[in-house]
Image: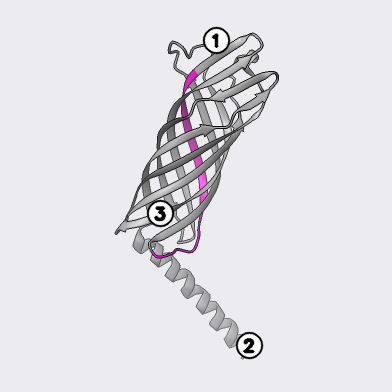
Amino acid sequence: MKGTQVLFAGLFAAVLLFSSAASAQEEGRHEVVLQGTGFYTKDSNGNGISQHATDTGGFLVGYRFHFNRWLAASADYGFVRNTQQNFTSTGPFNVQSNIHQATAALIVGLPSISRLQPYVLGGAGALVFDPTGNAGGFVSGAERQAKAAFVYGGGVDYKLFYRVAIRAEYRGFVYTRPYFGLASLNSDVTAHTAQPSVGVVFRF
């Protein structure tokens, strides 16, 4: 009797696993997404330097692979441009830069509600700050600098049609503030950037 119960439990688990995988495959395991983003960095102070980054917007493109209906992995690239404003004892120094973000994350799906599919995410990557050299945002000697970043967040997909959805998402980045290779701008503080976004998802 006990052996039969174990066998039944094993078969039941296998059916659940198969049906979950089949469901994910029917909906498509692959996703591409295009999102418009905001980019808002918290002010910081360190080593006698007060720092502010201008609020801005950009875009995010990504690819997501669904292992099953609950777990997925993503790779994303984003772009924005802002100005890092540094207020020091010798005066203000503004560095305008293009910011490239490259991240990878694991996504855990939460129980769906009608057409809504919420999820949470966590991962890591890099933010690359590349000075533009434009007038008003240029400091002599400023160099491109990459910073490792932890990314976390969550979002929700609203299914519009078969394999097409609208996505609203929030991502937070935690990283060391850039100083562009200039010791005089090195505040050595941890920065936090909020990145809300909305976009379109295509699943295949």
Image check: 96 left or right of 147? left
Front of the two marks 2 and 1: 1
Q: Which residue is located at x 41 percent, y 42 percent?
A: 62
Q: Tell which circle, 3 or 1, labels the residue nearer the N-terminal end.
A: 1
Residue 90 is covered by the magenta coloring = no
Q: From the image, which quarter does the C terminus lie in?
A: bottom left
At label 3, counting other C-alpha atoms closer than 10 Å, the crowd grade (few under 14, some 14-19, many 20 or more) is: many
Residue 105 is covered by the magenta coloring = yes
Distance CA(mark 3)–CA(mark 1): 44 Å
63 in relation to 135, above or below? below
**Residue highlighted by disc 2:** 2
Secondary structure beneath dot 3 equals strand
Q: Which residue is located at x 46 percent, y 29 percent?
A: 100
In the image as oriented, which residue stretches furthest toward the left?
161
- The part of the image, by quadrant, that contains residue 81 is top left
Image check: 159 left or right of 154? left
Q: Nearer the viewer, residue 104 or 175?
A: 175
Q: From the image, which quarter does the N terminus lie in?
A: bottom right
Secondary structure beneath dot 1 equals loop
User: Label 1 amino acid?
Assistant: Gly
Q: Position of residue 153 (x, y in %)?
A: 53, 47
Distance CA(mark 2)–CA(mark 1): 75 Å
In the image as oriented, which residue stretches furthest toward the bottom?
1
**Extent of the magenta region:** 96-114
At label 2, counting other C-alpha atoms closer than 10 Å, the crowd grade (few under 14, some 14-19, many 20 or more) is: few
Q: Tell which circle, 2 or 1, labels the residue nearer the N-terminal end.
A: 2
Q: Position of residue 180 (x, y in %)?
A: 56, 18
Q: Residue 141, which numbered label? A: 1
User: Label 2 amino acid?
Assistant: Lys
At label 1, counting other C-alpha atoms closer than 10 Å, the crowd grade (few under 14, some 14-19, many 20 or more) is: few
**Residue highlighted by disc 3:** 157
Judged by its main secondary structure, the magenta piece is strand
